[in-house]
Amino acid sequence: GPGAPSIGGSTGCCSEPGEGSTFWFSFQAEGAADGAETRDRIVDVACDERWRVMVVDDTALNLRLASHMLSHMACEGLLMDSGAAALDYLRTSHQSTFPDIVFMDFCMPEMDGFETTAAILALCPNMPIVGLTADASTEHHQKAMRCGMRHVLIKPFRERELAEACNQFGSRVEREAGAARVVAAAPSQPSRVPADRYSVQD
């Protein structure tokens, strides 16, 4: 069949070694009161800016879903299938190509979302990272905050929630710092980036 995304829904899964897997799906039901659900999907998904968004998730289905949502939101997606891949990108790419925000799955093999978040923040202290999980427990939320995540989205989440997180937490501080260094390296083009652009709002 066409699958949930083609009928206005979403699917995904999260697997925890030794604890089993959680598979989820949502769909757009007909007859929503006054079309409120449809308005949510069409009107409220707009982003304030064209964010460059990194999504780190070991499940291909979740990455495809994220790619679909980001495309609909007119954002640029950087899709990473592991924590190691995300770190490799940040270590080998020029800072001017860095993401404005990272969405991080909690449960991944080898290096989980908490470890990856700590490693990313060691490289890029100002990088906004938002956790993704199907586990809504207080314990997991507190662990996410302790490792440096700014926020947590509970799966399944809607495009509106993804867009709101981008608008609230997205920041070009890391990317603009790299771009400013590129400009400053060219004597004929002195940097015009004001110093206050480097300040970070909590």
Image (tube, grey):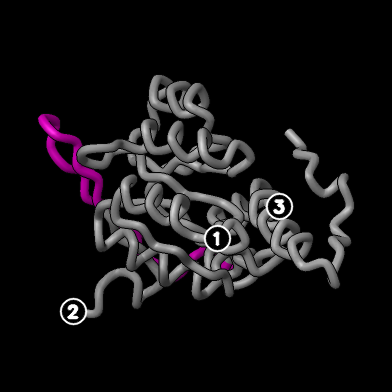
The quadrant of the picture occupied by the N terminus is bottom left
Query: Looking at the image, is mark 2 or mark 1 earlier in the sequence?
Result: 2
Please give the name of the residue rendered at 66% of the width and 65% of the height, measured from the top-left corner. 47
Crowding at mark 2 (Cα within 10 Å: few <14, some 14-19, many 20+): few
Question: Element at badge 1?
Answer: loop
Residue 1 badge: 2
Hey, what amino acid is under mark 2?
Answer: Gly
Question: Element at badge 2?
Answer: loop
Crowding at mark 1 (Cα within 10 Å: few <14, some 14-19, many 20+): few
In the rendered image, the residue lying farthest to the front is: 187
Q: Is residue 30 magenta?
A: yes
Q: Which residues are magenta?
A: 13-35
Please give the name of the residue rendered at 53% of the width and 30% of the height, measured from the top-left corner. 148
Q: Is residue 185 above or below residue 171?
A: below
Image-based side of 54 in relation to 181, left or right: left
Q: Is residue 163 magenta?
A: no
Q: Is residue 13 above or below residue 36?
A: above
The alpha-carbon separation of the residues under discs 1 and 3 comes to 11 Å
Q: Position of residue 158 (x, y in %)?
A: 48, 57
**Can you identify the residue that label 3 sits on?**
177
Image-based side of 154 in relation to 189, left or right: left
- Near-viewer residue (13 or 80): 80
Query: Looking at the image, is mark 1 or mark 3 earlier in the sequence?
Result: 1
**Can you identify the residue that label 1 sits on?**
94
